Image: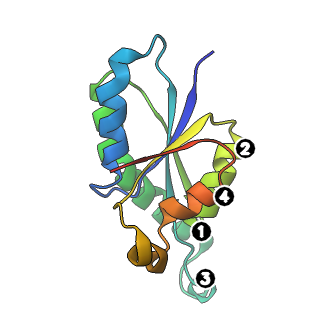
């Protein structure tokens, strides 16, 4: 039975650390995992709907999210791993953990800056929120 891994990406260099880890260890697996890439777009203020219609907003979120996933998708595809791409809108940590639950993911791989102590607490990183909320194992890469 294949593993199903959720890999959030905001398009940053830090987010690509998880992709690098997957590619580095790909030869070690008997069966490659199913990889679900997710980008979570932050919800825009409600009053923006007065100026931009909902279809335009959906299209904006989808285009921006797909652009953020492009580098991760390209690296995985080059390594022979074909990911599923998903774009969500909402609070990143909540969307990631709810997506993992609803799609029966076996683990979440997420890049982190590696801040700890007071800095990490003050920043309240998405990765740390995911660790606290997730019902499946979370692998932090840096």
Q: Earlier in the sequence, mark 4 or mark 2?
A: 2
The residue sitting at 60% across, 67% down in the picture is 90
Q: How many labels were placed on the picture? A: 4
User: What crowding class fits label 3: few (fewer than 14 Cα within 10 Å), some (14-19), or many (20 or more)?
Assistant: few
Q: Earlier in the sequence, mark 1 or mark 3?
A: 3
From the image, tell me which residue sits under label 4. 133
The residue sitting at 36% across, 52% down in the picture is 15
Q: x, y percentage for residue 76?
A: 34, 32
Q: Closer to us: mark 1 or mark 4? A: 4
Q: Which mark is residue 117?
A: none
> What's the distance in space between the residues labelled 2 and 1, CA to CA?
16 Å
Q: x, y percentage for residue 82?
A: 42, 27
User: What crowding class fits label 4: few (fewer than 14 Cα within 10 Å), some (14-19), or many (20 or more)?
Assistant: some
Q: What element carries label 2?
A: helix
> What's the distance in space between the residues labelled 1 and 4, CA to CA?
13 Å
In-front residue for pair 116/36: 116
The residue sitting at 57% across, 64% down in the picture is 129
Q: Is residue 77 visible?
A: no
Marks 3 and 2: in contact by CB < 8 Å?
no
Marks 3 and 1: in contact by CB < 8 Å?
no
Q: Closer to us: mark 4 or mark 2? A: 4
Residue 55: quarter of image? bottom right
Q: Closer to us: mark 1 or mark 3? A: 1
From the image, tell me which residue sits under label 1. 91
Q: Earlier in the sequence, mark 2 or mark 1?
A: 1
Q: Closer to us: mark 2 or mark 3? A: 2
Residue 106: quarter of image? top right
From the image, tell me which residue sits under label 3. 49
> What's the distance in space between the residues labelled 2 and 3, CA to CA?
29 Å
Q: Earlier in the sequence, mark 3 or mark 4?
A: 3
26 left or right of 60 in image: left
């Amino acid at each position: 039975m294949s593993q199903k891994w959720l890999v959030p990406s905001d398009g940053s260099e830090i987010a690509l650390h998880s992709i690098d880890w997957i590619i580095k260890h790909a030869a070690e697996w008997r069966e490659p995992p199913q990889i679900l890439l997710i980008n979570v777009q932050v919800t825009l203020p409600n009053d923006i709907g007065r100026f931009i219609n909902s279809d335009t907003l959906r299209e904006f979120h989808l285009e921006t999210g797909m652009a953020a996933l492009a580098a991760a998708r390209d690296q995985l595809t080059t390594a022979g791993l074909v990911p599923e791409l998903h774009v969500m809108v909402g609070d990143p940590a909540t969307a990631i953990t709810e997506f993992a639950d609803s799609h029966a993911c076996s683990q979440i791989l997420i890049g982190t800056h590696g801040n700890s102590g007071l800095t990490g607490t003050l920043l309240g990183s998405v990765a740390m929120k995911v660790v606290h909320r997730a019902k499946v194992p979370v692998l932090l890469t840096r």
